Image (cartoon, coloured by chain):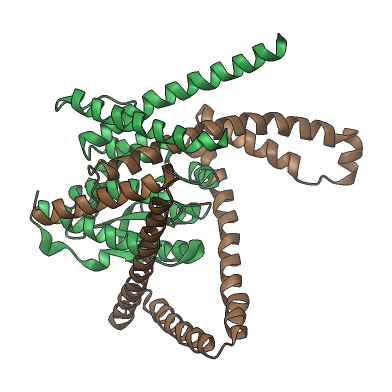
Amino acid sequence: MRVRSILSVGIVVFFGLLTLAGYFIPFKPLVDLGGGLLYIAVFLSSIALLVGVINLSRIHLRKAARGGPGAGYSMVLFVSLWVTFLVVFFAIIQGKDVITIWIVRNIQLPLEASLSALVVFALLVGGVRLLYRRRDAVAFFFLGAALIVLFAAIPLPSLLEEWLKGPDYYRQMLASVFLSVASGGGRGILLGMALGAAATGLRILMGSDRPYER
Amino acid sequence: MEAYYPWIAFFLALILAGLILIFNLMQRGRWPVFRDLPGYNEVSSDVGASVEAGTRVHVALGEGQIIGPGAEAELAGLSALAKVAQAASISDRPPVVTSSDGLTSLLSQDVMYSTYRQMRVEERFDHDLGRLAGLGPAGYTAGAMITTSTEKVSATFVIGAMGAEAALIADAGAQHGTVIAAVTDPVGQAAVFATTDHPLIGEELFAAGAYLKVSHTHAASLQAQDVLRWIAIAAILLGALASTFLRLF
């Protein structure tokens, strides 16, 4: 291991353990030190974000200059990114939040809403594809549970409601049985994920996982 | 009782760390046998196929942040990236990695560079291959979807913190090749279960390092997790029995 690697592992392990100690031990100077270290880390993270945005705009500028498929989209991204940045920057300097709010409400939110609508279609298509792609018991159970929960959630036509004679009771009973099973399974999954997350963190603190090795 | 939670967490962390060390020492160079997970079995064949076809592998690390929510999933994804980059290092088109966090994109560049240096092919490394695809869930999803279609991608590995939007990235990936997905969010897990051939559910995300044989410590930590899981199951069952017994008598 090179000297630089040893140094970076030492820094990560030392400051990681110090921050963790601040969480476990209620000793004020240690807690304050942990908070201060986190503050520095968040500051460095925001600088990394700026570097990332500059890198992103560089990639798209290069794509736009090169031409080919998607070059127009890259140009739109580059121009809109920096125009928005400049407009919001000067709006903040002049204390005019109205412009920023207008951009978020009229451009960003509709775009995000349309993407969310696409998710629904992707899930619908995925659900249908699931029927002929994976014909195992788990896939059928997954689809059956999804359909029952949906059946309990959607409003039925009034004629069908009358015919079922008080459908809410039966529908909700069926849904609650499935939701109980699902929440039990969900808790089991979360337990496993918590253990996995703890083990991942411990590997970093033990210096065996080193994504920062360069 | 809540005052004791940090101490309980501390002792659990100590037990977990101790078990990792013990299992690491017990392995003595041998690789433990784990149950079959088709998702991870497909990784090496998908990377091999992309190398042969002259196409790229897209590793989508998701919307998590190293300092913030989803850090553990990002770190698990970075572990998997090391192995994917190693397998694809002979390719003319190295893997492209997307994330939604500045630090994660820098770390992905580091992981790829150190892997390429180990393989003595650092001249093939390009900083632009570890990139910030977009900010926020919607921005990241749009960026990752475009990456799949514009970078000649034939295999997409979605591994990280992601919600239902993972379905869109998986769908875009499936149009150009194969998709393997492991995400943290419960809704995202349901979404990838419906949209991918080999979904990885729950803690299987954190088994990436052990299944892809990144290091013996990854295998040891998976064994340690299994031991603690059985202890947790026993504690839950005993707690339920004790509670029932106390109510009855």
In the shown orientation, is residue B78 left or right of residue B144? left
Residue B89, given in percent of the width and then of the height, sits at 16, 53
* Nearer-the-camera pick, A45 or B110: A45
Q: Quadrant of the C terminus of chain B?
A: top right
In the shown orientation, is residue A181 left or right of residue B97? right
Residue A93, given in percent of the width and then of the height, sits at 50, 88
The quadrant holding residue A41 is bottom left
* Looking at the image, residue B131 lies above or below residue A211: below
Asked if residue B158 can be seen in this view, the reply is no
* Nearer-the-camera pick, A155 or B105: B105
The quadrant holding residue B213 is top left
In the shown orientation, is residue A132 left or right of residue B214? right
Total labels: the figure holds 0
In the shown orientation, is residue B29 left or right of residue A120? left
Residue A63, given in percent of the width and then of the height, sits at 31, 77
* Looking at the image, residue A180 lies above or below residue A112: above
Question: Residue placed at 51% from the left, 55% from the top?
Answer: B165
Residue B224, given in percent of the width and then of the height, sits at 33, 28
The quadrant holding residue A94 is bottom right
Question: Residue placed at 74% from the left, 43% from the top?
Answer: A153
User: What color was chain B assigned in the picture?
Assistant: green
Q: Quadrant of the N terminus of chain B?
A: top right
Q: Residue furthest top?
A: B249
* Nearer-the-camera pick, A89 or B120: A89
* Nearer-the-camera pick, A55 or B155: A55
Asked if residue B20 can be seen in this view, the reply is yes
Which chain wears brown?
A
